[in-house]
Amino acid sequence: MKKNSIRIFQVIISSLLLTYLIIIFKDDFSLTLFKILNPSYLFLSAIIVIFILPYIGVNRWKYFLKLIGINENFLLLYKISVISDFYGLFLPSNSGFLAFKIYFIEKLNPEKIGKGGSTIIFSKISGLIIMCIMGIIGSFLVDIPKIWTIRAIIISISIILFSIILIIKFKPTIFENLSNKFKNKYLQKLASYFNKLYKAISEFPFLKAFVNSFPLIVIFQLCTILNVYILFNVFGVNVPFLYNLAILPIIYIVTLIPVSISGLGVREGLFVYFFGLVGVEPSVALVVSLSNYLILSVTPAIIGGILSIFSPVIKKEVAQMRSANE
């Protein structure tokens, strides 16, 4: 009941925020939505989302898995990624899909409990670090209202991230006895897994993985920012790329907070506010935010939804593994 109450609350928050924004800007919103001035840019966006981002993201994850002794082929990892995207649409924040990626990869590799999940957590943390670095650099290359506020928030988030990494690396046993504090067997099991995951993250070769995957992470994050730049041009608005570089990191990071389903409403409000600082009309910012969400998140999720129906990610692979072992 508690979980259902939280989910209902998040759905209500998402709905109210989106409804509020659309009602306020409904006239301009309707005009903007059908005012696609440069449709050719949509082709560029599709190439980024359907081909470039999956290729980079899956190969990066494949490398991280290889570091801990898990060797999976590209197509299987791609299938896990898009199916996780599909299920993640219904979870809070814009990173709910991570839980499903952890579940799938560890279901296929039960001897690597915790370790499989550590690659996904590291991938997210490393991406956030690069996003923060790019945001800080971008904030020093532009002159927009309240840039000091934006810069201060990104720097603060960066300090928090580095602090978390230091705690994980130097306090690997901090949750060692966590399961003993619960009497409920399900909570004990959950706490035991959390401890294994935490320990696996602390043992993950952070520096080696980060250095070797640095170019891929940078290109991946730049592509997500480039996609927003392209979408603004679809509606005939040229927001300089450096402005996007300074603003988008803070939007992407804040929407990780599980306030609404998939960050809906929160993300759109942030787009309207921050891009309004550089002269973008609220209706345009709102449409671009929703378009970016549909293209970046919903498109791969649709592919994942189709695959989850016709090609289950677990049953087939587990059956093959068992038959091979026998």
Image (tube, helix red, strand yellow):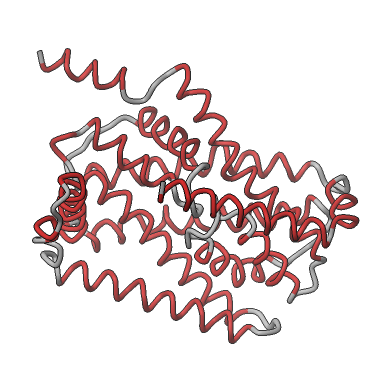
Which residue appears at 36% of the width and 61% of the height? 125
User: Nearest the camera: 159 or 19?
Assistant: 19
Q: Is residue 231 above or below residue 247?
A: above
Q: Is residue 126 above or below residue 262?
A: below
Which residue appears at 41% of the width and 75% of the height? 158
Q: Where in the figure is residue 89, as x and y percent of width and height?
A: 52, 42
Which residue appears at 72% of the width and 66% of the height? 272
Q: Where in the figure is residue 87, as x and y percent of width and height?
A: 47, 37
Q: Where in the figure is residue 100, as x and y percent of width and height?
A: 37, 40
Left or right: 260 with respect to 284? left
Residue 205 falls in which quadrant of the image?
bottom left
Instruction: Indicate the quadrant containing the C terminus: top left, top right, bottom left or bottom right.
Output: top left
Q: Where in the figure is residue 238, as x and y percent of width and height?
A: 78, 62
> Given the current orientation, which residue lies at the most extreme front position?
1
User: Nearest the camera: 46 or 261?
Assistant: 261
- State the count of labels: 0
Say whether residue 262 is visible. no
Say whether residue 211 is visible. yes
User: Nearest the camera: 257 or 300?
Assistant: 257
Left or right: 167 with respect to 38? left
Left or right: 261 with respect to 159? right
